[in-house]
């Protein structure tokens, strides 16, 4: 009898739950004009993902959890700071500092207390100070949203678990140009590197984490 791929992975012990921790931060990866405008070289329709991110952002702001936005911005002439990645993707030229492609999509509310990470490559951890930003706040759980699922979201989630943070990838809040790449990446992340969680359970967690602990202490 042939077993499904899901069952095969379960039988081999993949996909165990990491679980939410006690001190979350929300990261919103590359929800910028170059990626959310479907008419641009790197763009796709991410309207539903933005709708899913909005309540997560509101709860994080309300409860004072760290919020980090990431963007890709290239400063140097001829994309020298894009390295080989700039050769691989011609669309990297739409992320030059003198354009608006790197700007956060205006549908998202960026508060004065939020951090903005400027990166050159896929992972939000690579070449940035994300680790000390998180550890200095005592963060143990990274709520992962943004785009693209198969690129920067995946790279960030993998680096998160490698750096000792619990990556929680919110299914409704991540997107990609390619649905097959999106679904395969979610499958693989949930099997090996992260928990793929729903928007509803994540909102419930963000609204309640810490409250029960405080009540018990009182």
Image: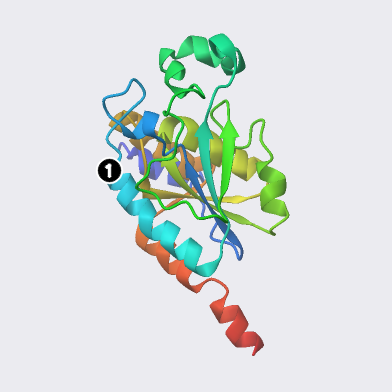
Is residue 182 shown above or below 82? Answer: below
Across and down, in percent, residue 34 comes to 38, 28
Residue visible at 42% across and 29% down? 100
The location of residue 147, given as percent across then percent down, is 41, 37
Q: Is residue 32 above or below residue 134?
A: above
Give the residue at x 54% y 9%.
Answer: 78
How many marks do you count on the picture? 1
Q: Residue at x 41, y 33 (%)?
A: 148
Q: Nearer the viewer, residue 47 or 11?
A: 47
Return the x and y of residue 116 as percentages of the image width and height: 56, 43
Q: How is the image coloured?
A: rainbow
Q: Secondary structure at mark 1?
A: helix
In this picture, is 60 found above or below 99?
below
Q: Residue at x 36, y 24 (%)?
A: 42
Q: Residue furthest bottom?
A: 218
Q: Quadrant of the N terminus?
A: top left
Label 1: few (<14), some or many (≥20) within 10 Å?
A: some
Q: Position of residue 187 (x, y in %)?
A: 40, 40
Q: Nearer the viewer, residue 18 or 88?
A: 88
Location of mark 1 (residue): 47
Q: Which residue reaches farthest front?
A: 98
Quadrant in which the C terminus appears? bottom right
10 vs 95, nearest the viewer: 95
């Amino acid at each position: 009898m042939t077993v499904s791929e899901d069952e095969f992975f379960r039988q081999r012990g993949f996909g165990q739950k990491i679980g939410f921790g006690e001190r979350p931060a929300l990261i919103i990866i590359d929800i910028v004009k170059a990626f959310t405008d479907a008419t641009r070289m790197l763009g796709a329709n991410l309207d539903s993902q933005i709708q899913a991110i909005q309540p997560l952002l509101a709860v994080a702001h309300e409860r004072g959890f760290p919020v980090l936005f990431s963007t890709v911005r290239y400063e140097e002439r001829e994309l020298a700071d894009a390295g080989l990645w700039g050769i691989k993707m011609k669309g990297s030229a739409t992320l030059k500092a003198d354009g608006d492609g790197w700007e956060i999509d205006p549908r998202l509310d960026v508060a004065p207390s939020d951090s903005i990470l400027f990166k050159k490559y896929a992972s939000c951890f690579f070449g940035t100070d994300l680790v000390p930003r998180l550890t200095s706040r005592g963060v143990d759980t990274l709520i992962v949203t943004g785009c693209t699922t198969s690129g920067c979201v995946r790279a960030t989630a993998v680096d998160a678990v490698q750096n000792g943070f619990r990556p929680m990838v919110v299914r409704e809040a991540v997107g990609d140009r390619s649905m097959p790449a999106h679904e395969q990446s979610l499958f693989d992340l949930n099997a090996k590197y992260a928990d793929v969680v729903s928007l509803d359970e994540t909102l419930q967690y963000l609204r309640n984490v810490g409250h029960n602990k405080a009540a018990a202490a009182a």
